Image (spheres, grey):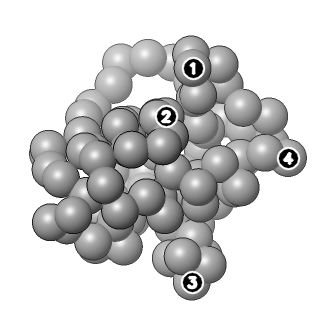
Amino acid sequence: LIGDLRDVKIEDILKFIKRLSKSGKLIIDGATRKGEIYFTKGMIVAVKKQGETLKKEHLEEEVLELLRQEEGTFTLEPTEEKMDTVSFIDPDEVILKL
């Protein structure tokens, strides 16, 4: 799944991932921030920024900053990459804070 952040509401992407219990990564290439949000069975489990996995205390803040961007592109793809689970964040909770 590939798209433009101006054409698709990020809330709809998060709902899609959660409702279908998707696992993989959502790559955000925004105008001001770039990063990867990793999902396991529909839950946000980790974020990578500049190749580094963020610590739990910065995870939700970075997810919100990535998802608040209105310009740029996104790519949702499966991943074979083994990620250490940093935390479990419910996408519905993130949507409420956007």
How far from the left and from the top, in percent, is residue 75? 24, 40
The residue labelled by disc 4 is 57
Query: Mark 3 belongs to which amino acid?
Result: Leu
- Tell me which numbered mark, 3 or 4, is placed earlier along the sequence: 4
Residue 38 is left or right of residue 24, and the answer is right
Mark 2, residue position: 35
Q: Is residue 20 visible?
A: no
Q: From what the image shows, is residue 80 above or below residue 37?
A: above
Mark closer to the chain start, 2 or 4? 2
Q: Earlier in the sequence, mark 4 or mark 1?
A: 1
- Is 48 on the left or on the right of 23, as rendered? right
Q: Secondary structure at mark 2?
A: strand
Q: Which mark is residue 50?
A: 1
Residue 96 image label? 3
Closer to the camera: disc 1 or disc 3?
A: 1
Label 3: which secondary element: helix
Q: Nearer the viewer, mark 2 or mark 4?
A: 2
Which of the two marks, 3 or 2, is nearer to us in this view?
2
Neighbour tally class for label 2: few under 14, some 14-19, many 20 plus, Cα within 10 Å: many
In the rendered image, residue 58, in percent from the top left (x then y), is placed at: 78, 45
Task: From the viewer's perspective, tell me whether residue 91 is left or right of residue 11.
Answer: right
Q: Looking at the rendering, which quadrant does residue 97 occupy?
A: bottom right
Report, in whole angstroms, how far the alpha carbon at label 4 lies from the one at label 1.
17 Å
Q: Residues within 10 Å of mark 1 (few under 14, many from 20)?
A: few
Disc marking residue 69:
none
Residue type (three-letter) at the residue carrying disc 4: Glu
